[in-house]
Image: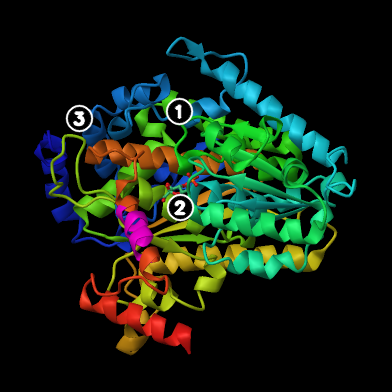
Amino acid sequence: MSPTESLAWKDLQAHAYYMSQSHISTLFKENPERFNQLNFSQDELLLDLSKQLITEDTLDLLLKLAKDRQLSNWIEKLYSGEHVNHSENRPALHTALRTPENSSLLIQGNNIIKEVHQNLKRLETIVSRIHSGQWRGFTGHSINTVVNIGVGGSDLGPLMACKALAESQPKELQNINVHFVSSMDGSQLAEILNTLNPARTLFVIASKSFTTIDTLANAITAKEWLKKASNAASEDILISRHFVGVSANPNKMTEWGIPESNQLEFWDWTGGRYSMWSTIGLPIALKLGTQGFKELLAGAHAMDQHFRQAPFEKNLPVLLAMVGIWNINFLNINAHAILPYDGRLSHIPAYLEQLEMESNGKSVTREGQITDYKTCPILWGEVGTNAQHAFYQLLHQGTEVVMCDFIVSARRYHDTENPDLQHQHQLNLANCLAQSRILALGDSVVEDSDKAPVYKRYKGNQPCTTLMLDELTPFTFGQLIALYEHKVFVQSVIWGINPFDQWGVELGKREATTLLDTLTPTGSRDAFDSSTCGLLKQIAKKASN
Ligand code: F6P
C-alpha cells in the first residue's frame, strides 16, 4: 500500500495545511515549554527539534504514520538479518559489525558476530604489526605512512572519521600519517607521491567489489611508482610488503596479487556506505589505535540498542527521520543543508551526501511502483562558520525553503591551557546558536525589525535541527553516524523503498567503458548524440596538437 493511502498521511496533510499558516517564532511565543517538550537525548547526544515547524500534535501524527508503515517490524527485519535488500537478495547487517563479542546472530547457520570479531582480530594484528614497526617495507624499514585507496563507501567514512577524531590519536601513534586517495583522474596520487618515501609507505586497496575502476587505476599507478622507486625488488615482494587489500571479494584480491596474509575481508551484507565499521575502517584503527576504533563501534552500538528498544516517542533516529518526512512530504521542502559547527567534521556533509542520497535517492517502491510522493531531498553542506560567508545568504533571504541540521559539541578545549582556543570555541558556539535562531525565528529576534527596509528583512521559518554532542569523541561520533544511518532506514520504510541498493550508478559505469574505447586513436567517434560526438572530436583534435 502506498503511504499516501494511510489515514495518518491524510491527517498529516490536513495538519500541514493548518501548520503552514504558522511561523516557528509564533510557536515559541505561544509555548515557553517548547524546548523542554521537543528536545530528546541519548547518552551524550542531544537532539533539539524545537526549531522545526512542528508541535507535539505533529509528532503524534508522524508516529502514527510510522506505526501504519509497520516500522517496528521493519526494524526487527533489519536487525535479525532478513533480506531487506530485496533487489540484491541479502540482508543489511551493519548493526552486526558493532555488536559485542558475547552476542550471537545466526545467518544461514553461521554465528556472524563470531566472524565479525575474528575479522576484527585480524585487523588488530595488522594494525599492531604496523604500529610496533614489525611490518617492514622492501628496504627493511618500518612503515610510517599509509595511503588508503578507495572511493565512495570505501573512502568517505574512514576519511571523515580520521579527520573528525584526529585529536583522539594517542601520542605514541602520531608518527603514522594516513592519506586518502579516491579521484579517478589520479590528481590526489600525483599530488602526494612526490612527498612519500616509497620504502616506508603502505597502500591499502579498499574496495568492497574489488572491481571499481577508479580504485584499481589508482592502485596500479601506486604499484608502478613503487616498482620504479625500488629498482630491483620483485613485484611479489613489493605487493606483500606494501599493499593490504580490504574487500568482500577475496578472489579478486588474490587475482590482483595480494597474498592471503595481507587480505582483510568483510561481507556482501555490508553495504559500501555502511562499511566504515568493518575492516574498511582499517585507516581509522591505524590512526586512533584499535582501542579508539572500538570506542567508535561502542558508540554506534549504543545507538543501535536505543533505536531497537526505545519507544518511538523517545527514539532519536525515528524522531529525526519523521520530522524529515514532515518537511519533505507535507511542507514540500526539497533541500537539506548539513552544517557542522566544528572544523573536525568538515567531511560529514560529503559522507551524508552518499549515505542519504545513494540510499534514498529512489523513485521506485519495493513493489516496483513509481512513487507519487517525494523521497530523498537534495542534501549538501559545509562547515557552518565557513558557509556563513558563502551560501547562508540564500538560506536567509533566498526563495528556497531549506531544512538545516546544525551539528556541534558543547565542550571543546576545556582540558587545554589555551584561552585563545577556548575563546574560539565560544565564538563558534555563539555563531551556531545565532544562525539557527535567525533561520528559524527570522528577524523577530531583534526589536523594531519591521521598520527595516525590505532588503534587510529576514523571514525565518527555515526549519532547523540541532544535534549537540557533549564532546566529540570516538564514542559520540559513533552514536552520531549510527543515528543518521537509522534515520535513513526509517525514511526508506515510510517511502517503501530499498535503501541498500544503488542501481542508479551502474549505467554510467558501462557507458564510460564504451566511451573509453572511442578515445583510442582508431576509435569511432560517430556513434553517439551530437554533443558527445562533438566533444570527442574536440578532444581528438586537441590531443593531437
Ligand atoms: O558506484 C557506487 C559504489 O558502488 C558505491 O556504492 C560504493 O561505495 C563505491 O561505488 C565503491 O565501491 P567499492 O567499494 O566496491 O569499490
Amino acid type at circle 2 is: Leu
Residue 266 visible in image: yes
Q: Main secondary structure of the magenta part?
A: helix
Q: Is residue 543 part of the magenta span, yes or no?
A: no
Name the residue: 87% across, 45% down.
Answer: 172
Q: Residues within 10 Å of mark 3 (few under 14, many from 20)?
A: some
Q: Is residue 360 left or right of residue 372?
A: right
At mark 2, the secondary structure is helix
Residue 387 horizontal/vertical position (percent) = 50, 72
The residues bearing labels 1 and 3 have C-alpha atoms spaced at a distance of 24 Å
At mark 3, the secondary structure is helix
Query: Is residue 99 depicted above or below 502 in this figure?
Result: above
Mark found first going from the N terminus, 2 or 1 = 1
Counting every numbered tag in the picture gives 3
Amino acid type at circle 3 is: Asp
Name the residue: 78% across, 43% down.
Answer: 237
Q: Residues within 10 Å of mark 1 (few under 14, many from 20)?
A: many
Residue in front for this viewpoint, 244 or 180: 244
Q: What's the magenta region?
A: 507-515
Dot in front, 1 or 3: 1
Disc number for residue 352? 2
Mark found first going from the N terminus, 2 or 3 = 3
Residue 419 horizontal/vertical position (percent) = 80, 65
Residue in front for this viewpoint, 26 or 458: 458
Residue 7 horizontal/vertical position (percent) = 11, 35
Residue under label 1? 93
Name the residue: 70% across, 66% down.
Answer: 192
Residue in front for this viewpoint, 366 or 11: 366
Residue under label 3? 68
